[in-house]
Image (cartoon, helix red, strand yellow):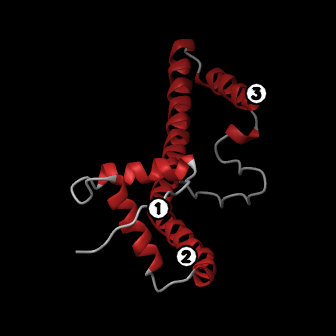
Amino acid sequence: MTTKTRTDLYLSRTTETALREYVRCHHDRFRTTSQAAEHLLARALMSPVDEGREALLVPHLVRAVRETVREEVTAQVHPFLDRQTHRLAMLLVQSGKDAYRAARIAEVALGHLLADPAHAARVAEEARLQAGARYRPGDPPPGRPARPPGDRE
């Protein structure tokens, strides 16, 4: 039988709270706070890593964990962002094509309503001019070379 002695320790509130939480989580191993404190203190005192080495290791461990987490997040998020970017680009191209088709349908419908296709073409051209160069089919966006004649998307 081992002899036990009584020692009074003065702990900060956070340490006491952490110790009580440890006892609560490991209630099957430790019936009392004293048993848990003895276990933790013995483990700390018998540990082969001293405070000097521990102080040297902690920054390296923190850096390694952060880098690993950063790499994992990047590996998971990057493919998702790529897929979303490609999807958005496809939707933008499709909406542009749909808008062009809608403008052509509207021009043809206007030609039938006015019974004058030439007048309908002039009205459609006026609408394109008011919309600006960016919205006219066949005109390159600013900073891009013009497409060769006959080249269609």
Q: Return the residue at label 1.
A: 7
Horizontal side of residue 125 vs 60, given as left or right: right
Q: Position of residue 91 (x, y in %)?
A: 49, 44
The answer to whether 38 appears left or right of 81 in the picture is left
Determine whether 132 is above or below 114 in the image.
below
Q: Is residue 6 left or right of residue 35?
A: right
**SS state under label 1:** loop
Give the SS element for disc 3.
helix
Q: Between disc 1 and disc 3, whose residue precedes? A: 1
Q: CA distance from mark 1 to mark 3?
A: 89 Å
Q: Residue at x 57, y 13 (%)?
A: 114
Give the spatial CA distance, label 2 vs label 3. 63 Å
According to the picture, the residue beneath numbered tag 2 turns out to be 61
Do the numbered discs 1 and 3 sit on residues whose CB atoms are within 8 Å?
no
Viewer-closest of 53 and 127: 53
Mark 2 and mark 1: Cα distance apart in space: 34 Å
Quadrant of the rendering where the N terminus is positioned: bottom left
Q: Amino acid at mark 2?
A: Leu
